[in-house]
Amino acid sequence: MDFENLRIFVEVARRCSFAAVARDRNIDPSSVSRSVASIEDELGVRLFQRSTRRLALTEAGNLYLSRVEALVDELDHARDEALAVSVGPVGTLRLTASVSFGHKCLVPLLPEFRALFPDLKLELLLTDTNLDLVSERVDLAVRLGPNTEIGMSSIKLFNTRYKVCVSPTYLKREKKPLHVPEDLRDHKCLLFTIPDFRSRWLFRNTDGTVSKVSINGDVMISNALALYDCTLVGMGPALLPNWLIDEDLAQGRLLDLFPNYRVTATDFETAAWLLYPSRTYLPNKVQVMIDFMRKQLGVSPLSRAESN
């Protein structure tokens, strides 16, 4: 049995597409089809059910995948360990994060990461859509919020906190009070387009009492960086995460309106999580990125701010 054919079979099973695997490998789709067909001929069974609309594993294909997938992963693991001894991590690491988190927290780290691992190629996929890690061949993802994604391995990077912020310019211009959360009802807030973020915010005081405050506004934005920029120029109060605004709060460019409250739109216990597809081993290229990000971000002022 040709090992490369086995690898192609596993890739097709994970992607559910001959064409996608062919694009990944920069080869003709017929080559992928021939590799799978050669395994089917050798086994004497059909591994995939093919139609014009979809590709799915047969019962035999599922059984075969359950046996050979771990074998392919283990051989990849052995290769990674051997290469790591001499040249360090190699290959291409596909990392995804939201546009705002990527620009603010990841892009500034790229020069140092490249200097540490010059033989490792990096694809940084910044999108506010949660990509399917398996079908999109994503090695590692940063997710913000509660850890709710099923079927993925996860590591907490740091806790996140939200604050209601305004610029000093806004406070000087507006005469309506902003002393308690309920005062927000008389102000036009800057709103994030996600449901809950645009309709009501939750406040928890030092006694643990939670109150819901309805909010309204006439500016609604789908990107946190744009929302942040509008807040800086004094367009109104906004609910923003600590990793985006901590430096501005320290420098006085933004003001935390309610420092004695914990604030959220969804859940008070949120974090930045590192997610990766569950498999029998963690590739060396993924491990070094996890270690690097935890060192650079997990012990930064961003994580220490969680106690505020």
Image (tube, rainbow, N blue to C red):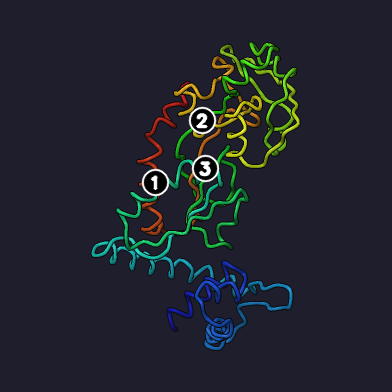
Residue 131 position in % (x across, y down): 60, 55
| 258 in relation to 120, above or below | above
Residue 109 is marked as 1
Instruction: Sort mark 3 into few (<14), some (14-19) or many (20+) by Cα contacts within 10 Å.
Output: many
Q: Which amino acid does label 2 sit on?
A: Ile
**In this rendering, position of residue 250 left or right of residue 192:** left
Residue 276's spot in the image, x, y percent? 49, 53
Of the two numbered discs 1 and 3 on the same chain, state the one appearing first in sequence.
3
| C-alpha gap between disc 1 and disc 2 | 18 Å
- Which residue is found at the position 53% from the left and 67% from the top? 66
Mark 2 crowdedness (10 Å alpha carbons): few <14, some 14-19, many ≥20: many
- Under circle 1, the secondary element is helix
Task: Give how far across and how far down residue 99 sits, in percent.
Answer: 56, 47
Q: Residue visible at 33% across and 49% down?
A: 112
Mark 3 belongs to which amino acid? Phe
Circles 2 and 3, Cβ within 8 Å, touching? The answer is no
Mark 1 and 3 residues: CB-CB less than 8 Å, in contact?
no
The three-letter amino acid code for the residue at tag 1 is Leu
Q: Residues within 10 Å of mark 1 (few under 14, many from 20)?
A: some
Q: Is mark 2 on a helix, strand or loop?
A: helix
Q: In this view, does 42 lie to the left or right of 89?
A: right
**Residue at numbered disc 2:** 245
Residue 294 horizontal side relative to residue 12, left or right: left
Which comes sooner in the sequence, label 1 or label 2? 1
- Say which residue label 3 marks: 101
- Placement of 212 over or under 293, stated as above or below: above
- CA–CA distance in space, label 2 to label 3: 12 Å
Q: Residue visible at 62% across and 35% down?
A: 227
